[in-house]
Image (cartoon, grey):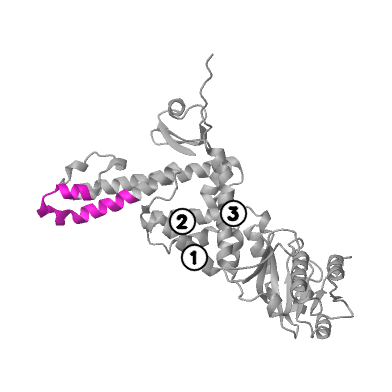
Amino acid sequence: MKVKRFFAKTMAEALKQVSEQMGPDAVILSNRRVDGGVEIVTALDYDENMARQSLGGEASEAVNGSRLAEMQAERHRRLEDELDRSRARIREVREHSGGRNQDYAGTAFDTLPEPEAEMSAEPTSRVADDTGYSGELARMRAEISSLRDLVSGQQSAPDKVGAHAAQQLLAERLQELGLSQDLAGSLSRRHKGGKLDEGWKQTLKMLASGVRTPHREWLDEGGVYALVGPTGSGKTTTIGKLAARYVLKHGADSLALVTTDRYRVAAHEQLFVFGRILNVPVRVVDESHTLDDILDELSDRHLVLIDTAGLTSSDRGYQEQLTELARSHHSVRTHLVVSATSQPRIMKSVWHCYKMAGLTGCVITKIDEALTLGESLGFVVETGLSVAYYTDGQKIPEDLHHARSAPLVRLAVERLEAFQQPLAAEAAPEPEHPRETA
């Protein structure tokens, strides 16, 4: 996507410039009156999806396509203004040098010679005197190069950029991964400049270090585990996968299933189906059987999995169910089940809704249905929840995986690359075919 800004005294003159330089396929992102005339920001090969990725977290403020185009235009203005400021800084450096490097005067910023070459052309007595000037010029050139890449959309990881520009590029790439603007900025600011590829790798390592995962699986460690979360997040299916894997590995004699969902008609039928197939007992918490009573009966079982009702704070029984889990005299490790397809705000809302149950971790489901995984990774980093498992399909038990931080981050990067490939293919120009001659 190529974005360009035009100035003219009248709208007609500005549109003429657009037509001559951009062609008939140009899209007008914004137009406004400025001192001395009008300003138009246009784009070639404009794509809303690419614009949203470029804007990152800011794109959430765009309620329609028109607003998104205006935000894209405003971003282009800011980058060009920053580029102008860098040019001004170079002019100041030239003036400060007292005209000692006249070869640079009038040279375009994108064709400046290397500072080392200029220094070698100077007399030996002046090399030390101009070292500060050449170093400042080198830093300006690196910064301008990175800004020019941002303006033209060529964010293909230049070899070296200034610290500020590198941090901006890293933050944008992290937001494309799905991280929030705040978390992406926090991670990117730890990079102090240099090779962008190395900075990207280090940033991903920092992200992975923030994703907590347990060393041992529930199936081996044993204990009592409860899954909580909203309706449709995948609690019962995940319990079915865990139970099937446990039976295949350890047998059915030391496993039991429990459900606390007595609020909906036939809510526990699916769990009973799993129990019959696996030959595992299923117990229901109700008015005559409390959770602690049932767990007392199952104290000889190595692993007990508890399914719960998907209730919100406005539902009947919400408080009762969470209090029952939190106050049990058994060591119940409650885990939040979060769908990877949920919006970050919904994930946070669900966490606030269920954290009174004393959450000790989470399970991420429906990873196969999510376009990007950064939202889920950002959620667990910001909340500090340990990721016990993740699921990526409906197959039982194949699509259940013990979570590890580095593979999860690697999967997120692979998912982003897979998501961007079709966009890159659509943006690529059609190959020209030679005309057939008679």
Q: Are marks 1 and 3 in contact (CB under 8 Å)?
A: no
Cα separation, mark 2 vs mark 3, equals: 17 Å
* Viewer-nearest of discs 2 and 1: 1
**At label 3, which amino acid type do we have?**
Arg
Q: Quadrant of residue 376?
A: bottom right
Asked if residue 14 is positioned above or below residue 76 in the image, the reply reads: above
In this figure, which residue is indicated by the disc labeled 3? 415
- Bounds of the magenta segment: 116-142
Element type at mark 3: helix
Q: Nearer the viewer, mark 2 or mark 3?
A: 3
Residue under pointer 1: 205
**Nearest to N terminus: mark 1 or mark 3:** 1
> Toward the viewer: 373 or 57?
373
Q: Nearer the viewer, residue 108 or 399?
A: 399
Mark 2 or mark 3, earlier in chain:
2
Based on the picture, tell me whether residue 117 belongs to the magenta stretch. Answer: yes
In the displayed structure, does residue 158 sit left or right of residue 282?
left
Circle 2 is placed at which residue position? 170
- Inspect the image, locate mark 2, and give the three-letter code of the amino acid beneath it: Leu
Counting residues from the start of the chain, the first of labels 2 and 1 encountered is 2
> Label 2 to label 1, Cα distance in Å?
13 Å
The mark tally for this picture is: 3
In the rendered image, the quadrant that contains the C terminus is top right
- Amino acid of disc 1: Lys
Do the numbered discs 2 and 1 sit on residues whose CB atoms are within 8 Å? Answer: no
Name the secondary structure under disc 2.
helix
